[in-house]
Amino acid sequence: MLITRRLEFDAGHRIPDHKSQCRHLHGHRYALEVTLAGKIKNAPGRSDNGMVMDFSEVKTLAKTHVVDVWDHAFLVWREDHAVAEFLATIPNHKTVLMDTVPTAENLARIAFQILDKVYKTTYGDHICLERIRLFETPNCWADALRDQSAA
């Protein structure tokens, strides 16, 4: 059985080598969908009886480890020195330095890597992260899938 929880956050970024507008500083209202696989619990008397996992737990872990870290931050590729240095001059600015260009594809892959470890550590083999879908806009998204998460 697959279950999915959607969370939203706001963040800024830029794609330095992009040939069009995305090379400029800008922001998005991102949506992150977390899809997990597991067996439906048969546990009469428990609050998660009949569920794979309580959606509030899916939200709490994704929010703590990805959404709260990236929300209202500027996501910067650490090799984009001019932007990183500029943002460092703003007191108390929330900047997240990344090892790769913060495209939708890379953000989905990074979120998958982070959350895969979190769900495995918390739930072992009972829950398996299958997909992270990251919407950069309502019409544009990237999927990081279990079989392709290292790519």
Image (cartoon, rainbow, N blue to C red):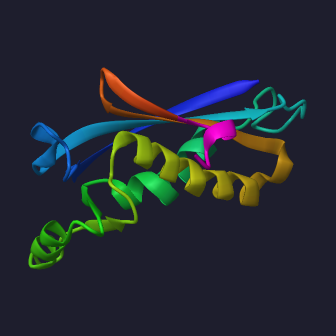
**Residue 25 place in picture, x, y as percent:** 11, 51
**Residue 86 place in picture, x, y as percent:** 9, 72
Please identify the quadrant where the N terminus is shown: top right
Q: Is residue 111 left or right of residue 1?
A: left
**Vertical relation: 85 (above or below) 58:** below
In the rendered image, which quarter is residue 94 located in? Answer: bottom left
Residue at 82% x, 39% y is: 46
Q: Is residue 54 left or right of residue 24?
A: right
Front position in the image: 107 or 101: 101
Q: Which residues are magenta?
A: 144-151
Front position in the image: 133 or 104: 104
**Vertical relation: 134 (above or below) 98:** above
**Residue 3 place in picture, x, y as percent:** 65, 28
**Residue 45 place in picture, x, y as percent:** 86, 35
Q: Of all residues shown, which one is farthest toward the top? A: 139
Magenta residue check for 146: yes
